[in-house]
Image (tube, rainbow, N blue to C red):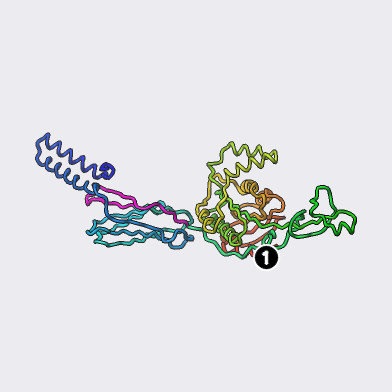
């Protein structure tokens, strides 16, 4: 134990004291012998700091576990003296991210308590590890230093900025609470028309009154109704973003749309790139080979998509924003076209896809990304370019919206655009 608490100064002190004692004894120098004995005695007294655990009670907690970029965040540290006598001063160190915040606590009298507020910088979105608190007791000469850990590490989530959007309850695809689609089906809720019976039709759909009138079997046909399933795919390729501000705008835009979808209780999927290191060359070659055959491609791409993209939790608004706090640009991430192809594997029942990317992506690339999704899926590309003029344009079934500020999302994704 003593070897772990001796500082480098303490080891130097002890070695010099021993040298003085040995050299003095060999040469007969009383002064050196006295100096060596004094040094060893001083070292021995300093070791008393390592023999006894400090009696302070130390605790810390985050004032808020979740904040938005730019909001105030604090760590509250409490140091209390529960003993009937005064306690010596000590230093309290609280790790905040990559920083080590050190605070000196003076002598505490009986039952005294000192509360310390440690500010946490929130200028950048992210997940900040806070704690555990470390108490350091050191002798006046700095020979012995004992460190005791208090509490467990906690995480501060710094959420991206979001903006409130209008309800998308009357979205691109009509759901069960709205109007039926134009797609026809043999079984649903909304009656469309009657047609002649063909082999294979369900006999339960035969309309007997019309059959009696016409003399031919007539069956009911329905308009298909679907509940909207939104997918948001966030581009994390570093090459297309000009800087951190552009990517932060993209994250905020994706978060705003996702939060609105959660509030509308829509089915939602949010996809981002996984770590580039987890994608092996074997999986990539399997993806290219599987493209030659549809059935094989589906099986292979499902495995590759799991490796290259990941789905964020959409259980709640807080959970989603927590995970978005940890999303960053990743070298080796798939480009927007490849991201769309991987996302399309999971788009079996998706009705609308939002592709969030940088403003530098050209129209040809955006069109290539949109055709990766099946017919009937509405694709909206949100191109984020700080300070650009907001504009919306149609490219076939593809809608491209340029976002210059976060406020532009409210205008461009209003009901007029959604129901167009």
Determine if the magenta segment contains residue 149: yes
**Please, is residue 301 above or below residue 155 in the view?**
above
Residue found 58% across the figure and 59% down from its top:
262
- Residue at image coords 31%, 50%: 148
Which image quadrant for residue 155?
bottom left
Residue occupying the point 29% across, 54% down: 91
Q: Which residues are magenta?
A: 134-157
| Along the line of sight, the residue nearer the viewer: 368 or 65 | 65
Q: Quadrant of the C terminus?
A: bottom right
Horizontal and vertical percent position of residue 107: 24, 59
Q: Quadrant of the N terminus?
A: top left
Location of residue 274 in the rendering, given as x and y in whole percent from the top left corner: 55, 46
Task: From the image, tell me which residue sits under label 1.
Answer: 416
Residue 360 position, x and y percent, is 60, 53
Residue 185 percent location from the top left of the image: 76, 54
Q: Relative to 318, is 2 above or below?
A: above
Per the image, label 1 sits on a secondary structure element best described as helix
Q: Is residue 407 part of the magenta span, yes or no?
A: no
Q: How many marks?
A: 1
> Residue placed farthest to the top in the image?
26
Asked if residue 286 lies left or right of residue 119, the reply is right
- Asked whether residue 286 is in view, the answer is yes
- The majority secondary structure of the magenta stretch comes to strand
Frontmost residue, 391 versus 213: 213
Q: Is 393 on the left-hand or right-hand side of 6? A: right
Q: Residues within 10 Å of mark 1 (few under 14, many from 20)?
A: few
Residue closer to the observer: 125 or 312: 312
Regarding residue 364, the answer to whether it shows in the image is no
């Amino acid at each position: 134990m003593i070897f772990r608490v001796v500082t480098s100064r303490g080891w130097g002190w002890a070695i010099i004291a021993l040298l003085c004692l040995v050299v003095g004894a060999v040469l007969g120098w009383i002064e050196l012998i006295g100096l060596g004995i004094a040094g060893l005695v001083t070292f021995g007294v300093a070791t008393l700091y390592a023999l006894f655990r400090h009696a302070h009670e130390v605790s810390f907690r985050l004032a808020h576990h979740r904040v938005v970029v730019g909001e105030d965040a604090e760590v509250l540290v409490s140091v209390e003296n529960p003993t009937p006598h005064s306690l010596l001063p000590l230093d309290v160190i609280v790790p905040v991210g990559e920083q080590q915040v050190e605070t000196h606590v003076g002598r505490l009298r009986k039952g005294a308590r000192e509360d310390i507020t440690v500010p946490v910088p929130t200028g950048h979105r992210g997940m900040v590890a806070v704690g555990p608190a470390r108490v350091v007791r050191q002798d006046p000469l700095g020979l012995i230093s004992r460190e005791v850990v208090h509490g467990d590490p906690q995480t501060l989530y710094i959420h991206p900025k979001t903006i409130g959007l209008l309800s998308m309850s009357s979205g691109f695809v009509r759901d069960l609470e709205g109007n039926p689609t134009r797609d026809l089906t043999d079984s649903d809720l909304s009656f469309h028309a009657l047609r002649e019976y063909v082999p294979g039709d369900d006999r339960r759909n035969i309309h007997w009154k019309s059959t009696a009138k016409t003399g031919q079997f007539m069956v009911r046909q329905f308009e298909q109704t679907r509940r909207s399933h939104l997918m948001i795919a966030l581009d994390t390729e570093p090459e297309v973003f000009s800087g951190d501000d552009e990517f932060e705008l993209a994250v905020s835009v994706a978060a705003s749309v996702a939060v609105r979808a959660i509030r509308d209780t829509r089915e939602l999927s949010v996809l981002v790139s996984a770590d580039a290191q987890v994608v092996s060359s074997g999986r990539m070659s399997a993806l290219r080979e599987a493209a030659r055959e549809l059935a094989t491609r589906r099986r292979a791409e499902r495995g590759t998509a799991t490796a290259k993209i990941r789905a964020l939790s959409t259980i709640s608004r807080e959970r989603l924003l927590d995970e978005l706090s940890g999303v960053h640009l990743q070298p080796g991430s798939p480009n927007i076209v490849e991201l769309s192809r991987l996302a399309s594997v999971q788009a079996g029942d998706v009705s609308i896809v939002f592709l969030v990317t940088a403003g530098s992506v050209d129209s040809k690339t955006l069109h290539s990304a949109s055709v990766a999704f099946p017919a009937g899926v509405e694709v909206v590309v949100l191109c984020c370019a700080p300070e650009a003029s907001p504009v919306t344009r149609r490219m076939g079934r593809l809608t491209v919206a340029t976002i210059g500020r976060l406020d532009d999302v409210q205008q461009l994704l209003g009901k007029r655009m959604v129901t167009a």
